[in-house]
Image (spheres, rainbow, N blue to C red):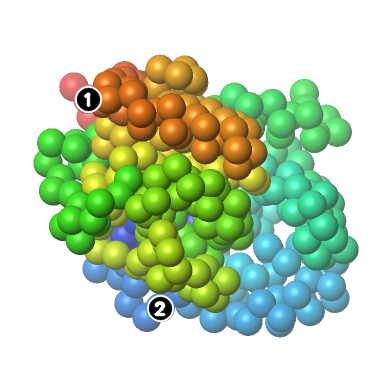
Amino acid sequence: MGEILFLAHRVPFPPDRGDRIRSHNLLKALARLAPVHVGCFAESAGEGEDALAALAASHCIAPRTKPLPLAGIEAVLTGKPVSLTAFHSRKLEAWVHDTITAHNIAVIVIFSGQMGQYIPADFKGRVVIDLCDVDSAKFASYADVGERVWLNAREARLLAIEEERLGARADATILISEAEAALYRSRLTAPDKVNVEVIGNGIDAAFFDPAATIPHPVVAGLPGPHFAFTGQMDYRPNEQAALWVIEALMPKLRARFPQAMFHVVGRNPTGKLMAHHGTPGVQVWGEVPDVRPFIAAADAVLAPLLIARGVQNKVLEAMAMAKPVVLTPDAATGIAASDGEDWLVCPPDPAAMCARIEALLRDPEAPARIGAAARRFVLDHHGWDAMLAPLAGLIGMADEGQRHAA
């Protein structure tokens, strides 16, 4: 039986942010099929070392220490996207070569397009690439709204070329939703040459279980109502959404609910966010050991993303916790829930969203009803086992998966 080489742009441990949750579960599914050799990047010494040692047949963790300005200079000099030069490591490149030479690697599985640069040109086995979402479209969106227009437009153009190259190279290219797959196909010059598959995001509903979670005592002890936003808070779309709530939505909400509180929960809040910490109605918590108590203490979870790609784990987590989620159409992409039943979808208009939230909270039965429907939806449609069921066939190890199941 052949072995698997798995390459990811971050250590898949701990599963505490969107991309790591997906790569973590992808890696566990691969390890049930065959021995897996894992190459990835870490931002701090020792990150994920013990977990990888316990799961992987071998591993290489390259330090993510290259400064972004240096990656930018390399990108300009080489004509490559910054996304690739930022994740280029000679150490990891040599390890990939040595691993393929020393082991019977039947398939290379790439998580995130930045890692496609490590696929050897002469590799004869299968290649499966999980792009998750269309990064080139994300950078194009940044340029369209006037953010660092030249740099983001350049990144969008060069990443689109790389995404097409990877699709043509791979036996299967995975996207996170049908909508993202359609977007990817629409940007290809030769879509008939790319095998595009969809594997959605799952959720551990046993972990995100409201019955097993005690609401955060500090939050629960304040009058409220309470609204929560979770995520990696130095990620631009998350920062942008949280600032929109603070600056545009909260003044309107507090006019109707004078003690309303907005809780920003997630690591690395930016200086712009921290500047609002402690202002009336705003609490920026930063990194916390567990987001579940904050979700449990919230009357509703907000996800007003203005730029979003793929499926939002923060939304699935809140739904699994039986909370009503109020979100923008962009944040709803890739999740086939029903507006008004499983969640509340609203355009990023402060007055409209405020009115929808007010109607929700004024109805004594609506939050529990929508929350219960949200959890049922997640249980029925977004378990990880169901999401990853096609993986064994895509990597050419369906027989191994069947034998394991037996």
The one of 138 and 110 positioned closer to us in this rendering: 138
Q: Which residue was labeled with disc 2?
A: 44
Q: From this view, report whether residue 290 is shown above or below residue 355.
A: below
Count of labels shown? 2
Which type of secondary structure does the marked residue at label 1 adopt? helix
Mark 1 Cα within 10 Å, few/some/many (few <14, many 20+)? few
Front tag of 1 and 2: 2
The residue under the point 59% across, 33% down is: 352
Quarter in which the C terminus is drawn: top left
The one of 67 and 371 positioned closer to us in this rendering: 371
Instruction: Identify the mark at residue 405; answer none if there is no mark.
Output: 1
Quarter location, residue 175: top right
Q: Position of residue 181 (x, y in %)?
A: 64, 29
Q: Are marks 1 and 2 in contact (CB under 8 Å)?
A: no
From mark 1 to mark 2, how far is it between C-alphas?
Answer: 37 Å
The residue under the point 52% across, 32% down is: 355
Q: Specify whether 194 is left or right of 41.
A: right
Query: What is the three-letter code of the residue carrying label 1?
Result: Ala
Which type of secondary structure does the marked residue at label 2 adopt? loop
Q: Specify whether 309 is left or right of 363.
A: right
Query: What is the three-letter code of the residue carrying label 2?
Result: Ser
**Residue 380 seen anywhere in this rendered image of the structure:** yes
**Residue 387 seen anywhere in this rendered image of the structure:** no
Q: Position of residue 223 (x, y in %)?
A: 25, 51
Q: Position of residue 65 (x, y in %)?
A: 54, 81
Quarter in which the N terminus is drawn: top left
Mark 2 Cα within 10 Å, few/some/many (few <14, many 20+)? few
The residue under the point 79% across, 79% down is: 73
Q: From this view, report whether residue 19 is shown above or below residue 376.
A: below
Quarter location, residue 81: bottom right
The one of 209 and 348 positioned closer to us in this rendering: 348
